[in-house]
Image: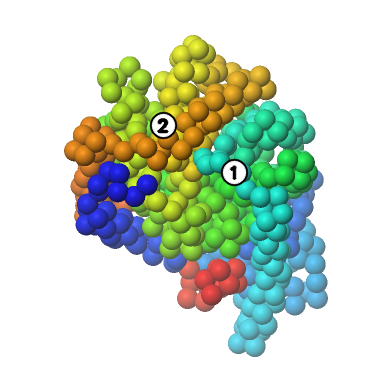
């Protein structure tokens, strides 16, 4: 694909340098702070599980108890494992239960030997959790080797969202049998603002059901059966976003999910989560994803649902470059970057399809080794299902022409109802018809030198460089506060979850981060 747009490599290199310069202060911030969710993720990997009779996870109770006694700045690993030695307990979940009852107090070891012992015990316990993550990754590799990957690209990505995990499972299996390569289980609206991860299999929710470890396990087991039946590995997606991003990333690694929605700014812009909380949580979650071999899906498509897809096209490119920098810094490889973009230009605009081709091809050429996640039209779906199905056909054709890696199946009933099985069947027919008919048409699609598509791509890249220069001058946090992305203004001193952020003390210790950065 390289070279169809004749992009100036000096401009591309400058864009990446500016993105790194804009992103580095945020990385420094993330490396010097922790959050309640990062600490809970550490304890989940150390083995804390289950919930109290009110449904509040024991891991929340344990972190809250440590925080109440000595704060978060030291990390929870040392005080928790020091307490286990002091009390003689060898079950960390039992310690959490006693802490919730007020029977355990937390403090820091008084001497070097005690500190070393607590760190060693914490490292051993969390190391056992990371070994499970490693085994799950090896399982995926073996299953792909045994059953194979889909023969075609893009992978066909389809959503299920019944609000009941036991209804989602047969729908997901039916979708895979009808040609879907990736199943995304939509979680309940509002879960991103819960500061705890619900427990168990769930049969409730709004427009989806909850992301829980048990739901992950059930769906993965069902899709493993379907993979065996179909002779190709079917991937599973959920959400590592919101206030519990690090914990959900850990649970995804423990249960072998394959892709996770994990954007650097989505929670800030569209859920009003505090920017510092988000960036700290995001870095840890991406480190876990890197270890687990999970592909992240970023959310630039959402910017174009609030901002104009032509005027704001360059903000998508800027966000993709920032997401790439943050992902590489956290240890993710290019093949794990499902950078997002979308087919959201008003179809009534003259030359709208040529503009979509320019934007999609620009993303493809800027990130040639990333799978990219190509999102279907939503903003301009009117409820006219015939028009919607035609627009989805244009979206599928743009994906085929520009060599996208992951194609989310568009629904003609978008903006009308949560799709029925029959809607998904028609939508999959649309995808199969276009992809089969187009074949390797992307090999023949070469925009005219200096023509409309090339010129538009160069313009968007140039505007992205201009915006990155401004962000470097002002700071990324100020740009977010000013409404640069998705026209949402989110100051760094406001937003949900800020009270769960703490600056590292000098003796801060996190055995998981230590292992992931080794």
Q: Residues within 10 Å of mark 2 (few under 14, many from 20)?
A: many
What residue sits 25% from the left and 48% below the top?
7
In the shown orientation, is residue 455 left or right of residue 112? left
Residue beneath disc 2: 398
What residue sits 73% from the left and 40% below the top?
230
**N-term mark: 2 or 1:** 1
Whether residue 78 is situated above or below residue 210 in the rendered picture: below
Can you tell which mark lies on residue 169? none
Whether residue 262 is situated above or below residue 353 in the rendered picture: below
Q: How is the image coloured?
A: rainbow
Q: Nearer the viewer, residue 479 or 371?
A: 371
Question: Residue 294, how many percent across, how many down?
Answer: 58, 54
Question: Residue 63, how many percent across, how many down?
Answer: 64, 60
Residue 98 location, quadrant: bottom right
Question: Residue 141, how many percent across, how many down?
Answer: 66, 58
Q: Residues within 10 Å of mark 1 (few under 14, many from 20)?
A: few
In the shown orientation, is residue 348 left or right of residue 140? left
């Amino acid at each position: 694909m390289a070279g169809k747009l004749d992009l100036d490599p000096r401009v591309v290199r400058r864009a990446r340098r500016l993105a790194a310069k804009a992103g580095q202060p945020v990385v420094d911030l993330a490396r010097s702070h922790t959050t309640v969710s990062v600490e809970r993720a550490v304890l989940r990997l150390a083995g804390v599980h289950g919930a109290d009779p009110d449904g509040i996870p024991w891991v929340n109770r344990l972190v809250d108890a440590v925080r109440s006694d000595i704060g978060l700045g030291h990390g929870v690993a040392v005080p928790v494992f020091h307490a286990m030695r002091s009390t003689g307990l060898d079950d960390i979940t039992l310690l959490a239960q006693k802490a919730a009852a007020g029977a355990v107090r937390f403090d820091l070891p008084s001497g070097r030997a005690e500190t070393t012992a607590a760190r060693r015990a914490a490292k051993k316990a969390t190391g056992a959790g990371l070994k499970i993550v490693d085994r799950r990754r090896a399982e995926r590799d073996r299953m792909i080797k045994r059953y194979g990957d889909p023969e075609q690209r893009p992978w066909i990505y389809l959503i299920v969202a019944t609000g009941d995990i036991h209804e989602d499972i047969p729908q997901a299996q039916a979708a895979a049998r009808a040609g879907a390569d990736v199943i995304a289980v939509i979680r309940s609206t509002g879960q991103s603002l819960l500061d705890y991860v619900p427990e168990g299999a769930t049969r409730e929710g709004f427009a989806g059901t909850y992301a829980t470890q048990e739901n992950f396990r059930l769906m993965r087991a069902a899709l493993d059966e379907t993979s065996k039946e179909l002779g190709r590995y079917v991937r599973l997606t959920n959400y590592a976003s919101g206030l519990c991003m690090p914990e959900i990333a850990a649970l995804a690694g423990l249960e072998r999910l394959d892709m996770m929605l994990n954007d650097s700014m989505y929670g800030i812009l569209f859920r009003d989560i505090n920017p510092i909380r988000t960036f700290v949580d995001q870095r840890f979650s991406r480190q876990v994803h890197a270890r687990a071999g999970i592909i992240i899906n970023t959310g630039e498509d959402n910017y174009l649902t609030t901002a104009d897809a032509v005027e704001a096209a360059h903000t998508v490119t800027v966000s993709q470059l920032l997401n790439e920098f943050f992902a590489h810094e956290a240890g993710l490889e290019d093949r794990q970057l499902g950078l997002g973009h979308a087919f959201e230009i008003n179809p009534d605009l003259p030359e709208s399809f040529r503009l979509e081709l320019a934007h999609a091809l620009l993303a493809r050429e800027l990130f040639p080794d990333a799978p990219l996640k190509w999102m279907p039209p939503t903003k301009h779906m009117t409820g006219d299902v015939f028009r919607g199905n035609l627009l989805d056909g244009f979206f599928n054709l743009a994906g085929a022409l520009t060599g996208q890696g992951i194609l989310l199946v568009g629904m003609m009933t978008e903006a009308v109802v949560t799709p029925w099985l029959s809607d998904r069947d028609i939508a999959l027919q649309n995808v199969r018809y276009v992809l089969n008919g187009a074949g390797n048409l992307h090999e023949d699609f070469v925009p005219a030198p200096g023509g409309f598509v090339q010129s538009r791509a160069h313009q968007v890249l140039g505007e992205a460089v201009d915006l990155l220069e401004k962000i470097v001058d002002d700071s990324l946090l100020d740009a977010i506060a000013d409404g640069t992305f998705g026209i949402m203004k989110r100051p760094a001193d406001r937003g949900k979850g800020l009270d769960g952020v703490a600056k590292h003390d000098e003796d801060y210790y996190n055995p998981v981060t230590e292992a992931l950065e080794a």
